[in-house]
């Protein structure tokens, strides 16, 4: 008598389900989850990446980002000369995101959408951004965003530490503190941060470890992210700042969140080149 094991039955059902999907009864949208600025899964900053076969409306993309519940989900639409790229947090669309751009480039190369020798061109709210593969990872070409010194009433109280410097670019604040341990042990009052006129607060210090030049953490409760694990866009501010303080244009950074992540930073004129690695941890289908 013919019989099948539970495992064989499960596999058969999975195959039949795929046949239904491929047959057109249910059309799915493929979504990847990628850990960015790390070589290890479950480290760095997770981002969702979806390469769309057609344009989708804003409400649909926002609902998907909310469902993914990651700091950012990236949506890519193929164009003749590159990809349109949009980023959504669980609560709103944003103008610029570093780690989800790295995750997007990683998926484009990994799935063979373009050759690894080619440069990826992204069309975004922040202008044209590019990515290419280098020996030590994927290099992103972003605009530099140097800060101007300002005083923000209430920031020191909200962070619970003394600040050596505060600077601003657009609505992102950068605050320098005395040492690396202060950055690591920081326990900000998120309710107080939420009342400040800022989309994000970057806290930084020089590193006491020779492995990297500076450390940072990034808090953005105003856009639904209490603490971002590794923030590529923040290094467009941090790069020029530490270039000025340390007198060097090539730096190594570490974001000391619970997950942590390494970023290579090179400042050239009005551009910041960020280099990082990424790991695909999940591939699923949204029905």
Image (spheres, rainbow, N blue to C red):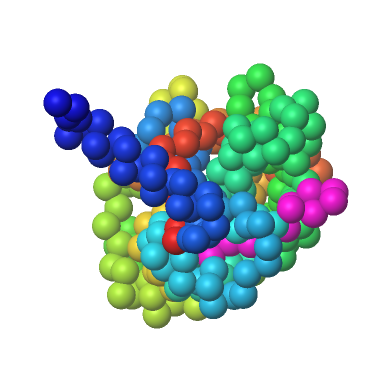
Dominant secondary structure of the magenta stretch? Answer: strand
Does 8 lie within the magenta span?
A: no
Q: Residue at x 47, y 66 (%)?
A: 64
Q: Residue at x 70, y 38 (%)?
A: 113
Residues 160 and 144: in front is 144
Is 123 rendered above or below residue 37? below
Q: Which residue is at the far top?
A: 135
Q: Which residue is at the far right?
A: 81
List x then y, in percent, for residue 110.
60, 32
Is 191 rendered above or below residue 69? below
Q: Residue at x 31, y 35 (%)?
A: 11
Residues 203 and 119: in front is 119
Q: Can I make out residue 187 in this image?
A: yes
Q: Residue at x 59, y 39 (%)?
A: 107
Drawn side of residue 28 relative to residue 227, left or right: right
| Quadrant of the drawing holding the C terminus | bottom left
Q: Which residue is at the far front?
A: 1
Q: Can I make out residue 204 in this image?
A: no
Drawn side of residue 198 relative to residue 106, left or right: left
Stretch in magenta: 78-88
């Amino acid at each position: 008598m013919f019989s099948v094991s539970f495992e064989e039955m499960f596999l058969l059902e999975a195959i039949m389900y795929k046949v239904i999907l491929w047959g057109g009864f249910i059309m799915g949208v493929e979504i990847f989850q990628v850990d960015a600025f790390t070589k290890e899964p479950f480290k760095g900053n997770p981002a969702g990446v979806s390469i769309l076969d057609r344009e989708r409306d804003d409400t649909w993309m926002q609902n998907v980002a909310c469902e993914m519940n990651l700091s950012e989900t990236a949506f890519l639409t193929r164009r003749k000369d590159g990809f349109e790229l949009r980023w959504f947090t669980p609560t709103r669309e944003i103008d610029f995101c570093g780690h989800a751009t790295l995750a997007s480039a990683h998926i484009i190369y990994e799935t063979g959408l373009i050759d690894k020798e080619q440069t990826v061109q992204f069309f975004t709210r922040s202008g044209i951004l590019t990515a290419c593969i280098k020996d030590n990872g994927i290099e992103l070409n972003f605009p530099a965003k140097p800060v101007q010194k300002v005083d923000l009433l209430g920031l020191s109280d909200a962070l619970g530490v003394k600040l050596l410097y505060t600077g601003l670019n657009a609505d992102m604040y950068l605050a320098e503190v005395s040492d690396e341990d202060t950055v690591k042990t920081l326990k900000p009052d998120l309710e107080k941060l939420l009342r400040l006129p800022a989309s994000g607060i970057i806290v930084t210090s020089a590193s006491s470890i020779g492995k990297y030049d500076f450390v940072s953490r990034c808090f953005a409760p105003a856009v639904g992210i209490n603490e971002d694990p590794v923030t590529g866009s923040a290094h467009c501010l941090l790069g020029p700042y530490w270039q000025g303080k340390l007198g060097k244009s090539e730096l190594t950074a570490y974001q000391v969140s619970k997950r942590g992540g390494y970023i290579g930073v090179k400042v050239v004129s009005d551009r910041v080149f960020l280099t990082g690695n990424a790991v695909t941890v999940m591939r699923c289908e949204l029905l």
